[in-house]
Amino acid sequence: MTSLPLAPPSLTPADQDALAELFRRGTAENTLRAYEQDLAYITAWKAAAFGAVLHWPEAEPVALRFILDHAQDLRASTGPARAAAEALVRAGLRRDYAAPAPSTLDRRIASWRAFHRMKNLASPFDAPLIKEARAKARRAAARPRQRKSENPITRDILKAMLATCHGSLRDRRDHAALALAWASGGRRRSEVTALNRDDIDDRPMAERGLIRIRLLHTKTTTPDRAPWLPLKGFPARSVLAWIAAAGIEGGPLFRPVSQADRVLTRRLTPGGFRTIVAHRLELAGYPRDFASPHGLRSGFLTQAALDGAPLAAAMQLSLHRDPAQAQAYYADVEIEDNPATDLLG
């Protein structure tokens, strides 16, 4: 966080350090990573496009040029925007010369605006002309909604993946992580890998056959209101079996496992969880890219729709705040599979 353009220069060094620490503690880790990536990108873009460093506040012509450069397909271009893009591709900051998705451009602009707020400055992106240009660019680049996962991992697919997990510690970890992620409401990979041992309350297991999972890090809740979600049946037993087999008494719940089948002490990364999903899909007979980790989330909601679970009930576990967003998964279910078609059957 210290690398971000934080705090106006009028603050004392001590106050700047205190403010940086406050922002670090009060900002989600995923957001911090996005800020750092976006800062690297816009810094490199301005150096390539203008041969200059970032200014605070940034000039409006620079903000407008940023929008124009990223609102066009540069694959057949030979102008200045293409030259700047080539520098970004060489630096590994840009993948190709196609116009980026509107959501990607929106995120980078949002980060740039946030950097201005951190320095208590007005953003050039709030100027009327630039706001209008951004709206026109978004409309011109409108695309059909893209799925975060090519396919949902529904119950049958998940069970096929779990069936590939046998007796090793790696198998036990993968079984527990996948079962927890799906059955607790379709958890995001960042939520699964952020879990610690003390986020698992196993006291209700003996009497009620369930455990409770505390989610301190989600996109829709805050740590002071962290939800405890129930996990029942074999997914709960799988998590407890992993904890016992791995001897986890504290710290990260899910961890890397060495080639020698030894549990390491560090935390499993979101990228490591992605690898687990791809590996288990492949072992179950599916292509590695059949689904992404988000397929666990979309699969849970799709299965809830197929089983006739009320949308509100599914949202209690998925923690969606926007019913329209969760409803999209229900709408994806083929109408002939809708349980309502069997009401008189």
Image (spheres, rainbow, N blue to C red):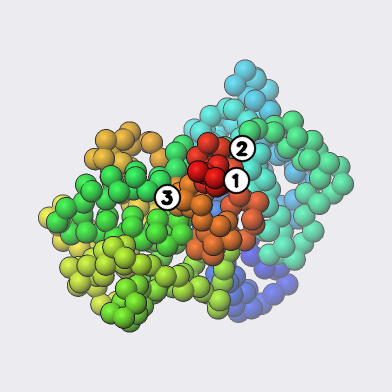
Residue 119 sits in quarter:
bottom right
| Nearer the observer, 272 or 12 | 272
**Residue displayed at 61% across by 37% down:** 145
Contact, mark 1 vs mark 3 (Cβ under 8 Å): no
| Nearer the observer, 112 or 172 | 172
Q: In this view, does 298 lie above or below 246?
A: above
In front: mark 1 or mark 3? 1
| Residue at disc 3, secondary structure | helix
Q: In this view, does 172 lie above or below 144?
A: below
Q: How far from the left and from the top, in percent, is residue 344? A: 54, 45
**Residue displayed at 59% across by 43% down:** 331
Q: In this view, does 41 lie above or below 267?
A: above
- Left or right: where 142 falls relative to 91: right
Instruction: Report crowding for label 2: few under 14, some 14 to 19, many 20 or more residues within 10 A (C-alpha).
Output: few
Q: Quadrant of the N terminus?
A: bottom right
Q: How far from the left and from the top, in percent, is residue 211? A: 35, 73
| Residue at disc 2, secondary structure | loop
Instruction: Report crowding for label 3: few under 14, some 14 to 19, many 20 or more residues within 10 A (C-alpha).
Output: many
Q: What's the distance in space between the residues labelled 2 and 3, CA to CA? A: 19 Å
Q: What's the distance in space between the residues labelled 1 and 3, CA to CA? A: 15 Å
- Which residue was labeled with disc 3? 296
Contact, mark 1 vs mark 2 (Cβ under 8 Å): yes
| Residue at disc 1, secondary structure | helix
| Nearer the observer, 15 or 239 | 239
Q: What's the distance in space between the residues labelled 1 and 2, CA to CA? A: 11 Å
Instruction: Report crowding for label 1: few under 14, some 14 to 19, many 20 or more residues within 10 A (C-alpha).
Output: few
- Which residue was labeled with disc 1? 328
Query: Can see residue 17?
Result: no
Residue type for callout 3: Leu
